[in-house]
Image: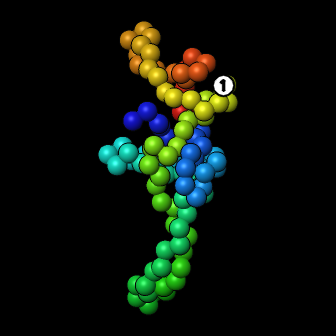
């Protein structure tokens, strides 16, 4: 997967279209990413015993990778990710400006 934890992204479709955020967690097998504050739904919980009451909570759900785009930190534009071999290391690069992408 070309997106990594800490990448700055923008949501391309859905109810949160246009919202920006940083990737908190990546699910490569499911091809989804978790972005705090984006794709929030209400979850109804049953009481789980004496100590845990039921109620309605806000829960963040993962988004498909195809619904987000990477924002290059250097040129500040939506971009695709490319790969380049330098000194035997595979580095991610911005397809628009050619700068090396480092996830924070």
Q: Quadrant of the N terminus?
A: top left
How many numbered marks, from 0 up?
A: 1
Rendered position, 61 above or below 2 = below
Q: Is residue 20 left or right of residue 26?
A: right
- Residue 66 can be seen in this image: yes
Residue furthest left as drawn:
29
Residue 97: x %, y % from top left: 61, 18
Q: Nearer the viewer, residue 50 or 56?
A: 56
Q: Residue at x 48, y 79 (%)?
A: 44
Q: Residue furthest bottom?
A: 50
Find the residue positioned furthest to the top.
87
Q: Secondary structure at mark 1?
A: loop
> Which quarter of the picture shows residue 12?
top right
Mark 1 closeness class: few <14, some 14–19, many ≥20 residues within 10 Å: few
**Residue drawn at (40%, 88%) of the image:** 49
Image coordinates of residue 82 in percent, x first then y, are 46, 22
Whole-percent x and y of residue 51? 46, 86
The quarter in which the C terminus is drawn is: top right
Q: Residue at x 67, y 25 (%)?
A: 75
In the rendered view, does 18 fall on the left or right side of 1?
right
What residue sits right under mark 1 in the picture? 74
Q: Position of residue 100 (x, y in %)?
A: 55, 20
Is residue 99 something that shows in the picture? Answer: no
Q: How is the image coloured?
A: rainbow
Is residue 76 or residue 18 the one in the foreground?
18
Instruction: Please tell me whether residue 83 is drawn above or below residue 30 in the rendered image.
Output: above
Q: Residue at x 61, y 29 (%)?
A: 72
Foreground of the two, 12 or 37:
12
* Vertical comparison of 63 with 71: above or below: below
């Amino acid at each position: 997967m070309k997106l990594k934890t800490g990448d700055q992204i923008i949501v391309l479709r859905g109810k949160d279209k246009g919202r920006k955020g940083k990737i908190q967690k990546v699910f490569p097998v499911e091809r989804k990413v978790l972005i705090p504050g984006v794709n929030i739904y209400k979850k109804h919980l049953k009481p789980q015993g004496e100590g845990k009451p039921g109620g309605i909570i806000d829960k963040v759900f993962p988004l498909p990778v195809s619904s987000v785009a990477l924002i290059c930190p250097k040129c500040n534009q939506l971009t695709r990710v490319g790969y380049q071999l330098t000194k035997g290391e595979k580095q991610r690069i911005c397809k628009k400006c050619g700068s090396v992408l480092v996830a924070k």
